[in-house]
Image (cartoon, rainbow, N blue to C red):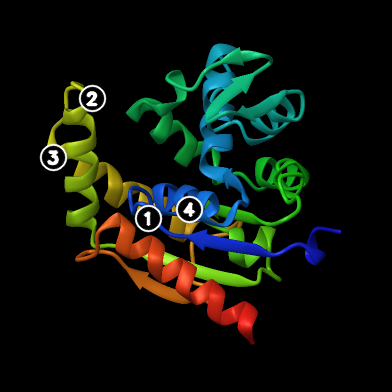
Amino acid sequence: MYNAIPVIAIDGPSASGKGTVAQLAADALGFAYLDSGALYRVVAFATQQKNIAWDNAEAVAECAKALSIQFKNGQIYLNNADISDEIRTEAMGKGASQVAIHAPLRAALVELQHSFCKPPGLVADGRDMGTVIFPEAELKIFLTASTEVRANRRYQQLIGKNQAANYESILLDLQERDARDKGRASAPLIMAKNAVLLETDHLTISEAVNVVLQNYQQKIRK
């Protein structure tokens, strides 16, 4: 049923800015928004709370099936508890990258991700939105930037929140995440064949959003 609803799928590596761009594009269009990466952060958080090792693929997937995850007013709820701040730490980012390699978990979350597709449309960001979750998306964007630019953005973001940050550590972490995301057997991070490449090294957020909106308008005019 979701195939009848317009979807903009935005994929890309960690800290590329795709989440911010996707949210703003969704707001501009009046579309729903799916932050698929947040789902994996929630799973990392929940499994840690239950002392389930992140490398235990079957246990992680079984845990995920029992979770009640909701997005409300920009906040993320797990079993009716607001965990928005808890899952946005660097530790949960690393955890999300580690649990996301498991095929059983990715399969367990497909239906949940499809449930976000509602009229009048959806903007979804992640690693496999255009290749696996919404392969028939109206528009596919592969949003990326150099590792150094992404590391600096993450560093500035953490400093802005008065959190301790080390650029070299962030850079190394992003390189490791990229390797995991691109090298995993299940739904690796790749650019869909019919996706638009959007490199943001020298673009502002508003400029990147405009590129997405312009490409969408061109698609629907056709």
Residue topped by disc 4: 22
Q: Mark 2 to mark 4: distance in Å?
A: 22 Å
Three-letter code, disc 3: Tyr
| Mark number displayed over residue 167 | 3
Q: CA distance from mark 1 to mark 4?
A: 23 Å
Left or right, 36 with respect to 132, comes to: left
Compute the Cα span from label 4 to label 3.
Answer: 25 Å
Which residue sits at x=76%, y=23%?
A: 66
Q: Residues within 10 Å of mark 4 (few under 14, many from 20)?
A: many
| Res 137 visible | yes
The residue drawn where x is 68% and y is 62% is 134
For the N terminus, give its image quadrant.
bottom right
Residue furthest bottom in the image: 222
Check disc 1 and report the residue beneath it: 179
Mark 2 or 4 closer to N-term? 4
Report the mark closest to the observer, 1 or 3: 3
Going from the N terminus, do you reach mark 1 or mark 2 first? Answer: 2
**Could you say where residue 114 lies in the image, as x and y percent from the top left?**
75, 49
The residue at the point 56 percent across, 26 percent down is 76
- The span from disc 1 to disc 2 (Cα, nearest Å) is 27 Å
Element carrying mark 2: loop
